[in-house]
Amino acid sequence: MSIALKELLYKMADDQLILGHRNSEWTGMGPLLEEDIAFSSMAQDKVGQSLALYTLLNQLGESDPDTIAFTRNANQFHNCVLVELPNQEYDFSLIRHFLFDTAEALRFEMLTRSSYEPLAQLATKIRGELRYHTLHANTWIKQLGSATPESIGRLQKSLDYAIPYALGIFEASPHEDDLIKSGVFEGEQKLKEKWMAKVESIITQTSLHLPDWNLAQPLFGGRQGKHSEHLQPLLDEMSEVFKIDPTAEW
Amino acid sequence: MASLDPRVNRLPAIAESVSPKAPLDQFGTFEVFVQPKEGKPFQHEGIVHAPNLEMAYVLAKEAFTRRFTCTTLYVVDTREVFASPMTEGEKNSYDFIEDVPAEGGAKVSFEIYHLTKRGKQHMHVGSVKAGSPREAMVLAKVKFNTSKVVYNVWAIESDKIRFTSEEEKELWLTLPEKKFRDASDYKGGDKLKDFLERQN
């Protein structure tokens, strides 16, 4: 059970850390001041959530959070590929934020019922942050997804590009049955079904279109350490100060 | 001949006929009110730019409540805020509001705000039922005008405000733990002192 639980915690923590770092790259460059602040705050929330999950791993016998976060190579990370992709234009960052945070909010909502009590407590504690993240994402998608031909066209292009990667969030764990039987987590398949329903409920309020789910091919690999060429440069940059001086404070 | 300065070349051409003035390509403003603690009055904190009320709510949350603890906030379109004359010294703004006969027709709720210190924020003092912002001011004069000088009064129709629902109050659940966002938490002076001591 310990291996299955650790694998779940690692992939969740890595997702939050990598996307938190990616989204923080918008700091100072957001499309308007208020949005710059909001997106940066949410990026900070994600890094904070990753710290909470790495702390749980530390309590289960893994290394301390800084060592876990800053000393692994790309093939030791378990995040889905979606979160490591470069930011590109803001339309892609918004679509990724919407697709990923919808899944993350649902995952943590399911985990409020987890038999692993520390995880259930964490999920309950951060529900307000997740509520804001999804409120923010849904409001932007509904706004730009119904605004002008340019905004609709750009979001649609990003949505089409991101969907196969988003389906990669739900890559099943080899320990899926253990997690479900022990009541730790209800499983990726159940999460995916909830996610598809939620994503549809927002997208149908816009001029955007979802692909046929039966034809969409998920891009897997991230959970097993198989990443795009974009992850290692991100890790190199993120760990630059730590590698020069592991005791540095700022 | 084109100018050698590219900024000059980017200037719009001189219009050949009379044309309507182009609107500014920017969002309108929305007023943000924050409640610092349960039971305390809401106070005006500032404005956000947004394309509509819901977007204003979403953007106001992080622009105004990402650091200091609070319980909740609400927003309203600036165009929905009706203000009395601004006064100074010992002049009370309520004295410049003329009594008008009560208006007939449907009454709606208006939220009333006072500015009692110049340079500070407008604070919520209560609500009245009125047929118009003007009538709301007159009723507020009867209900809220005490001996204290009020420099400015605002009246906002309650239904025009994007309030926070009971469920949404959890948006601020973890805010007390985010002290690291406060500049004083960086303890920059202590770090600099330590650094200088290490150099010696």
Image (cartoon, rainbow, N blue to C red):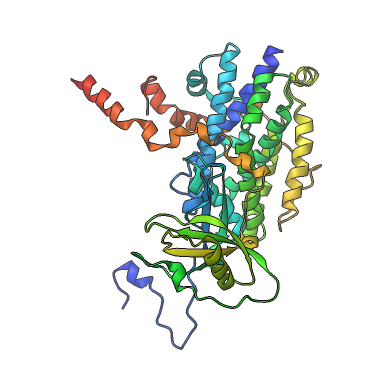
Q: Is residue A26 left or right of residue A135?
A: left
> Is A168 drawn above or below residue B159 in the view shown?
above
**Most foreground residue, B135 or A133:** B135
Determine if residue B27 is in view. Answer: no
Q: Is residue A92 left or right of residue A2?
A: left
Q: Residue furthest top?
A: A61
Name the residue at 44% across, 87% down: B16
Name the residue at 43% across, 47% down: A28
Give coordinates of residue A213: x percent, y percent: 79, 43
Give coordinates of residue A200: x percent, y percent: 76, 47
Q: Is residue B151 left or right of residue A200?
A: left
> Is A8 drawn above or below residue A88 in the view shown?
above
Name the residue at 71% across, 37% down: A167
**Most foreground residue, A56 or A4:** A56
Q: Residue furthest front?
A: B147
Give coordinates of residue B57: x percent, y percent: 58, 53
Q: Residue furthest bottom?
A: B17
Determine if residue B138 is in view. Answer: yes
Name the residue at 18% across, 20% down: B200
Give coordinates of residue A39: x percent, y percent: 53, 44
**Most foreground residue, A157 or B126:** B126
